[in-house]
Image: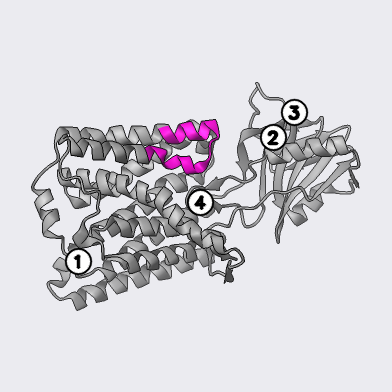
Amino acid sequence: MFIKKLAGKNYFVALLILLGVATLLIISFFLLTALIPDTIGLKPVEYNVTSVNEFEPWTFEANGLKVNFPEGGIITTLSETDNSRSYLLVGEGIYEPENKIPDTEKPGGIFIVVEDFFFEEIRGSNIFIPLVDEIIHNRISAFSEKQIGIPTVWSETIPLLFHAHEGLFYYYFITTEGEPILPPQANYTFWQLFGTFTVYFLFVLIMLLLITIFTLDHKYSRYWFYLGKTPPGRFSLLLVPLSLMLIISSVILIKIMGWHEMLSSSGYAIVIVLLVALSGSGRIDYLDLGLRRDRLQHGYFLAIFTAILIIATVRGLPQSICTDNLFIFLHLPIIFAVYGLPRELVWRGYIQAVISRQIGPTKGLIATIILAAVTRTVIIAITAPWMLAYPYTYLELAVLVPGLAAILGYLYLRTENILACALLHSLILWLPGIILY
């Protein structure tokens, strides 16, 4: 609206203004990623046992952590990258961390991610001997399967891993049964965190500007003007928090019980069935869930373009596309039906639409963004409260989750087609699985 007022009715002037702002943001984006390495994040590491060795009595000190294995122990390599490795050290040791270990836990070992050269430095002249005892080997393998490693953020969308570019030293203790004692300890700097938060915030702004540029001639349909003059009833508004409570409860239950992740959309399915039933009984009015025949042809190209740009920015340019298994291409319609469409029908088709009828489209979008962030925060606080002590969790809660909600919600405002939003949502979930890096 501000751009249109500034440019009057001249869309060319508005386009130039938007392109100029987008260009400045893109330049700022690339400058930050160049000045502060690894701000975008990395693809999560897969932890597999690559070697298991016994070691002699060993004492080392690093980043405020003192560890002493007076009788030696077992060291397992779980991952190797270009400049770092992940290790699991198990044995009767004396552990003196910078921060106190919970009194209820007795460490039986430690998981460490460290730079190669630094590990060789703290290893010193200690000799590693391959482990031959099969029983102990199997026990260590079972321990290894329980490790979370460096936490992954935005794990249900585009999983991202963050660690220091230099001076990497990340660790957490494990119990005598191999269970992680969380939260972990990591050596992140303010500038690393600042860079990542700023880069992703700029990225969200760029995506919103690009959607605006592609839909510069957008005008709200008569239907939306009509709905804006017909506020929803109290019962329709009450269903918003009730729907969120049902969604949160179902997700938490599925995570706690360890059920298959495909069931995570069951709460959305229940909400949709409930809404349709209440609409049929006349309890709620104007329930279209964004599926209006006159708008179904809009927004698909924009959804595809936006999804590709998001994946390319977050994960980098792909080397190739996975074509070995053609069945992977069948995953897209499954993701669309199980994840993308149900979630968009509820979040955009109902929650955002109802709130927008009450307080207006812009405020409705902002309110929906806040609700998305609060919902994710509640789920993490209940299912993985230790994550709230991990700094990059707040990148997910403060930028990534509300940012994606802003992009999807804004696309809905500009297209009024829930299927375009569902396609964008589905592509974001599907594309990382078929791209090889």
Residue 176's disc number: 3
Q: Is residue 36 visible?
A: no
Q: CA distance from mark 2 to mark 3?
A: 10 Å
Q: Nearer the viewer, mark 1 or mark 2?
A: 1
Residue placed at 53% from the left, 70% from the top? 317
Q: Nearer the viewer, mark 2 or mark 4?
A: 2
The first of marks 2 and 4 along the sequence is: 2
Residue placed at 31% from the left, 48% from the top? 345
Q: Are marks 2 and 4 in contact (CB under 8 Å)?
A: no
> Residue at label 2?
173
Q: Nearer the viewer, mark 4 or mark 1?
A: 1
Give the residue type that dot 1 points to: His
Q: Nearer the viewer, mark 3 or mark 4?
A: 3
Asked if residue 266 lies left or right of residue 10, the reply is right
Q: Which residues are magenta?
A: 250-268
Q: Residue 75's x, y, as percent?
A: 81, 42
The first of marks 1 and 2 along the sequence is: 2
Q: Quadrant where the C terminus lies?
A: bottom right
Q: Residue 87's x, y, as percent?
A: 75, 46
Q: Residue furthest bottom?
A: 12
**Which element carries disc 2, helix, strand or loop?**
strand
Q: Nearer the viewer, mark 3 or mark 1?
A: 1
The first of marks 4 and 1 along the sequence is: 4
